[in-house]
Amino acid sequence: MSEMTIEHESVPELAGAATSDEQLIAMLVERARSEGVQLTGAGGLLQQLTKRVLESALEGEITDHLGYDKHDAAGRNSGNSRNGTRVKTVLTDVGPVEVKVPRDVEGSFEPQIVKKRQRRLTGVDEMVLSLSAKGLTHGEISAHLAEIYGAEVSKQTISTITDQVMDGMAEWQNRPLDRVYPVLFVDAINVKIRDGKVANRPVYVVMAVTVEGTRDILGIWAGDGGEGAKYWLQVFTELKNRGLDDVLMLVCDGLKGLPEAVETVWPRTIVQTCIVHLLRNSFRYASRADWDKIAKALKPVYTASSESAAAERFSEFQDAWGKKYPAIISLWENAWAEFVPFLSFDVEIRTVICSTNAIESVNARIRKAVRARGHFPTEAAALKCVYMALMSLDPTGKGRKRWTMRWKAPLNAFQIAFEGRLTPANN
């Protein structure tokens, strides 16, 4: 495939004010077509244009640095002058591009478009981060760049690029929060971490619904599976120190010690156990053949009109299934205090807080990224993966709109049920 050399002299209209961007592009594409130059790939039109743009920008930078144009007599005896160029290859969105970087005699020129020792333009870094957030391993990203762009990027380089997110993660994890949130959802994702041996470790995600009805991930924390009240007290105290003074309801999956910690940090917060998780845990104690029957028998309990009605329906369930599955009875009795709160509210609130379904779409994205990696060498590597997955959520903004619409009615119900505790956040 032949190459089309793009120089200022070959396109005289480049400097003409009468030539529009569209005309210039059409002219270059037509010339590339007539000379048999492909659009992409090695020596393609896009690579040549990128090379020309970069070299023109670098020439403009050294002109600004020296204070005179190339070949200008004003540069004579100025104390510093151009000193040729050095060739370097940089990885760009259109593949590797070889550019000539100008130098000065003093060696004081510091280019900004393509900085010293820089081998990648920012678009490549963003591409690597995006692919990593979607769950591709470092090896898969390296292979993708080699196949699509003909660029050899090592796994170590990709790791270096993704490590850049750690500073942003620390800032995100410590950012100020709103004063009040209607609902917090707390859930865990199990990841495999190699610490001597590979073992499952939970990564906890705390997601909030704002007073405007949008989703806000407040932070992520790693545990070892043995968390209790002390652990959750540290997490919630951290959130409070970031400005979170009040939470109306907190929905979780019966995490040990969590209700006690909530009582200490936010005394007025109602802790609600996730009904879906309670049902799933019930099925663990039952034969697969009885799952449908048990689900049908428990539905009158969690759809009852009041706590007293739920107690009556549960008594009926106990009479029918207690002898065969006493562990299910114990499970519900132990969770009863955190199960019944939502029964005191109307259907709008019940619908959105009786389960952690609101966080399931978030967890699905995290699980996809986590499964692709298999296991992680360190806790920090696991947290980085989860953080990057979270940052790639809802790129189009459509999910945000759906959330806002879904939460309009519940937020109005919260405002009434909790006597205006949401109002100060709007002031």
Image (cartoon, rainbow, N blue to C red):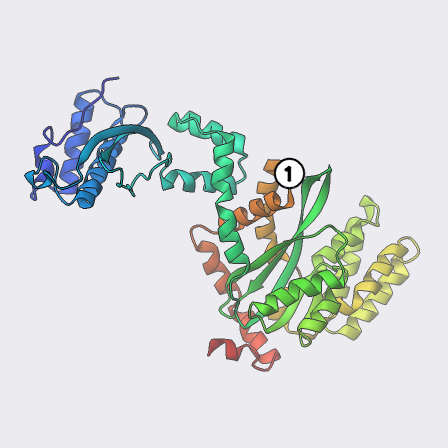
In the image, is 26 to the left or to the right of 221?
Answer: left
Mark yes or no: residue 367 visible.
Answer: no
User: In the picture shown, does residue 300 fall above or below 417?
Assistant: above
When the figure is inspected, residue 374 is found, relative to residue 351, above or below; the finding is above
| Viewer-nearest residue: 226 or 87 | 87
Residue 335 in view: yes
Q: From the image, which quarter does the N terminus lie in?
A: top left
Residue type of the residue flagged with mark 1: Pro
216 relative to 50 in the view: left or right:
right
Q: Quadrant of residue 195 in the image?
A: top right
Residue displayed at 57% across by 63% down? 208
Q: Hey, which residue is sitting farthest right in the picture?
A: 323
Q: Residue at x 18, y 45 (%)?
A: 64
Horizontal and vertical percent position of residue 172? 51, 57
Question: Which of 361/312 is in front?
Answer: 361
Q: Quadrant of residue 411?
A: bottom right
Q: 94 above or below 424?
A: above
Q: Outermost residue toward the top?
A: 1
Please report the residue visible at 52 percent of the width from the left and 79 percent of the height from the top: 423
Q: Residue 200 appears in which quarter of the rendering?
A: top right
| Extreme residue toward the bottom, this view | 419
Q: Position of residue 270 (x, y in %)?
A: 68, 72
Q: Which residue is mark 1?
A: 377
